[in-house]
Amino acid sequence: MVDGADGEASSLKQHSSTASTHGLPSTASAAPAVRWHLFCDLDGVLADFDRGVAALPGARGRAPSELSLKQMWRMVAQHGNFFDSLRWTPDGRDLWRGISAAAASSRVASVRILSGLPAGPLGRRSAEQKSRWCQRELGAGVELITCMTRDKHRYCTPPAVLIDDNAKLRAAWELAGGAFILHQDTPTTLRALESLLAGGSPEDAPVCSNDIPP
């Protein structure tokens, strides 16, 4: 999703080694498994922000990238219930099912939604709308954190991984000690998450032939 007026809108490496003495395995007990705090973006990852904007009367089918930020946020504000009314992204439900399955494993300590807000009064209203969306679509037990998009890294509590479609957030998140998965499609994201939870890095995930553009 686009950055906007501060708008919308947790990376870590598991290290393992086998010590040896004169070629014999060490008898020292293995280090405890890393348990990740998993943060997932909302707009553009689970909720279809782009389609929601295109459907606004003033947008006339145009994507956010085809509008000025001022135009876009003005139309969102006029809607009255924009974020609560968003549909799922085409593969958002599959992504959430994959995240929920990962959350049941011993490798995940927590799952939270981390979503950016537009500035000012619209931000406060947006937070309420996003909360209703999450309670209805994800369940009342799922924690939602909202903040300025630029401040997402402040919620990085290593070991933490953030799934987000905004590549501009990677540097600050990784500087805070977290792992970052740039979401472009659900299969790629879930493979990257699986690789991370298995002790590798998101970049170690195998690439399937159907992920490679023709």
Image (cartoon, rainbow, N blue to C red):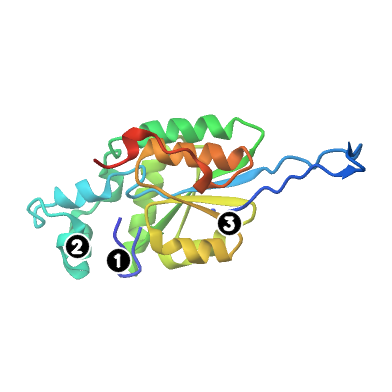
| Quadrant location of the N terminus in the rendered image | bottom left
- For disc 2, the neighbor class at 10 Å (few under 14, some 14 to 19, many from 20) is many
Badge 1 vs badge 3, beta-carbon distance below 8 Å: no
Tag 3 residue = 178
- Mark 3 or mark 1, which is nearer the start of the sequence? 1
Mark 2, mark 3: which one is toward the viewer?
Answer: 3
Residue at the spot 9% in from the left edge and 52% down from the top edge: 57
- For disc 1, the neighbor class at 10 Å (few under 14, some 14 to 19, many from 20) is many
Viewed as shown, does residue 202 lie left or right of 64?
right
Tag 1 residue = 4
Residue at the spot 33% in from the left edge and 58% down from the top edge: 125
What is the secondary structure assignment of the residue under circle 3?
A: loop
Tag 2 residue = 72
Badge 2 vs badge 3, beta-carbon distance below 8 Å: no
Position of 165 relative to 110 (above/below): below
31 and 86: which one is in front?
31
Mark 1, mark 3: which one is toward the viewer?
Answer: 3
Residue at the spot 38% in from the left edge and 37% down from the top edge: 186
150 and 74: which one is in front?
150
Residue at the spot 59% in from the left edge and 51% down from the top edge: 160
Per the model, the C-alpha gap separating discs 2 and 3 is 31 Å
- Mark 3 or mark 2, which is nearer the start of the sequence? 2
